[in-house]
Amino acid sequence: MKQDFRYLRIVDGLLQNESYQLLQASEDLTQLWFETKENRKTKVLRIARKDFTWSNLLERDMEHVHRRVATLRKQWLKKELFIQNVYIVDDYPLNQWESVLHSYEERKKVFIDTVLLTEQEDESSYEQFAQNIHIDYDSSPLGDEELSLYHERVKQNVIYVMNKQKKKEQDIFNRGKPFFAYIFLSIQVAMFLFLELNGGSENNLTLLEYGAKYNPYIVEGEWWRFFTPIVLHIGLLHLLMNSFALYYLGPLVEKIYGRIRFFFIYIFAGFAGTLGSFIFSSSLSAGASGAIFGCFGALLFIGRAYPNLFLRTMGYNIMMVIGINLVFGFVVPGIDNAGHIGGLIGGFLAASIVHLPKHKRLGMQLLTLLFTITLVTSLLIYGFSEKNIEKDTNSALSIASQYIEKEKYDEANRALAPFIENKSKDSRVYFLASIVKFQENEIEQAKNYLEVAVKYNNQFHEAYYNLALIYRELGEFDQAKDAINQAVKLHPNDNQYNELWQKLHNKSS
């Protein structure tokens, strides 16, 4: 009973000290786990009321402690973790127990400092121990009945602390019922069906028509393309993957942040994902991936606001999922990882701006808002710069070629116009532009574009051949012969080139 009393006094002192956070308690209160900080380092204290007749029983318990702390170290993403393992026992084990303690002092970055406090130690030893861990310890004696009442009071205190922590966590993770998550899910499914009925969700021209991210059109002023890609998906697999992710992740984030905050986070993260893609990728793209990664970013913000809670609950799993997805995006071609990273950062910044419900840090929120505005403005300025526009040439050429095949010459012109206006030095731009102008019967302009094309690339035999055709059409036969001579010289085995060469030279002779 003396040891029961001492154990309860230490537990009571730990519960009353705000530096110690209760992590876990056994149902019979014979062991409790606490978390604390020491010199800014996380430390675990485990106190147990045990009795070990033999050292093998102590070893078995030490193995349990080590496994538990090793798991915590991984969950908390710690390089190493220290634990003070305290046993309140009646007496020491009978055989060589010291070697057991020594064998568990350091294993796999887990450091265990074990203390056995027996009945033989006087009260001063317990008072000194309490002083070392910075808790109060009252050694006033208690009778049997008082001890029973005291035990019940400590038990109720443990239950109260655990319920209080549980309620706090529930308040954080359950702010309301999800609404917008399901709305966004419904919209993206509906838009997929709409695309399938209007040309196909994997048809670039259909995607372009209905709002996919396409850098040249954004540069021309179609700013809404920063947002419309959020609800468009390219193919059934893309839709299914993002829909499953949104179905499981979206409601969780909306429960934590509430409807209005979630709406802002999701939309801003989607915008940030498109902005990242706009800056770093020239591909035509669409999908809710940026917004979904923004949900991950919002969960990461909880790690900033409540680091211990985050690491104890979801932190390890969330970071693992983010890491795997980002690595997957870098390894597998065709995945717009710039959009994923942009969405992740956007979600974190949006969550930092709105913060969690009933939590206000106006100074930090305002600084984050100003930083976000500055960052977005800077990226937009760079995105609309001539240097960044030039990287989109290949994408524009692909789109323009598809429009030419469909005989949609106005759209082909539109796709190429930003590069001609910016005086691109890519000869392919002017070659395709000449085809469009020729089909529109603007022969003189087609000739001008081809002359620019061979100026920037004097090895462009197709351009020389087309130029020869146009010169012949305009009656400029000397220029036509010069052009076909260059084409045949660069590509002597082409039958079309040789046939035109024969016609021009026979005509002249």
Image (spheres, rainbow, N blue to C red):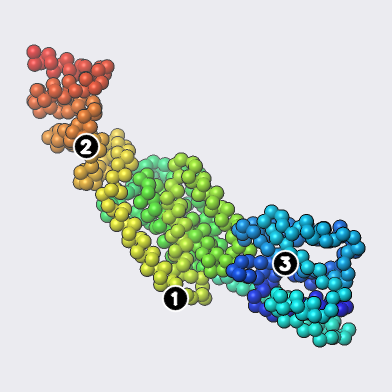
| Disc 3 to disc 2: CB gap under 8 Å | no
Q: Residues within 10 Å of mark 1 (few under 14, many from 20)?
A: few
Tell me: residue 429, above or below residue 165: above
The quarter of the rendered structure image containing the N terminus is bottom right
Calculate the distance from the C-alpha at mark 3 to the C-alpha at mark 1: 39 Å
Tell me the distance, in whole angstroms, between the alpha carbons under discs 3 and 2.
Answer: 74 Å
Instruction: Please say if the residues under marks 1 and 2 sit with CB atoms less than 8 Å apart.
Output: no
Q: Viewed as shown, does residue 498 lie left or right of 64? A: left
Amino acid carrying label 1: it is Leu
Q: Earlier in the sequence, mark 1 or mark 2?
A: 1
Residue 197 visible in the picture: no
Which of the two discs, 1 and 2, sits closer to the camera? 1
Comparing 254 with 273, the one in front is 273
Observer-nearest of 62 and 499: 62
Residue 362 bears which disc, if any? Answer: 1
Mark 3 or mark 1: whose residue is earlier in sequence = 3
Label 3 sits on what residue type?
Gln
Dot 2 alpha-carbon crowd within 10 angstroms: few under 14, some 14 to 19, many 20 or more? many
For the residues labelled 3 and 1, say whether their Cβ atoms are less than 8 Å apart: no
Q: Quadrant of the C terminus?
A: top left
Across and down, in percent, residue 127 comes to: 77, 80
The percent position of residue 56, horizontal first and vertical second, equals 86, 57
Q: Give SS at disc 3.
A: strand
Image point (23%, 35%), residue name: 427
Question: Circle 2 — which element?
Answer: helix
Residue under pointer 3:
84
Q: In the image, residue 430 lies at what x, y percent?
A: 22, 37
Residue 406 in the image: above or below residue 55? above
Between the residue at mark 1 and the residue at mark 2, the CA separation in whole angstroms equals 54 Å
Label drawn at residue 430:
2
Q: Nearer the viewer, mark 3 or mark 1?
A: 3
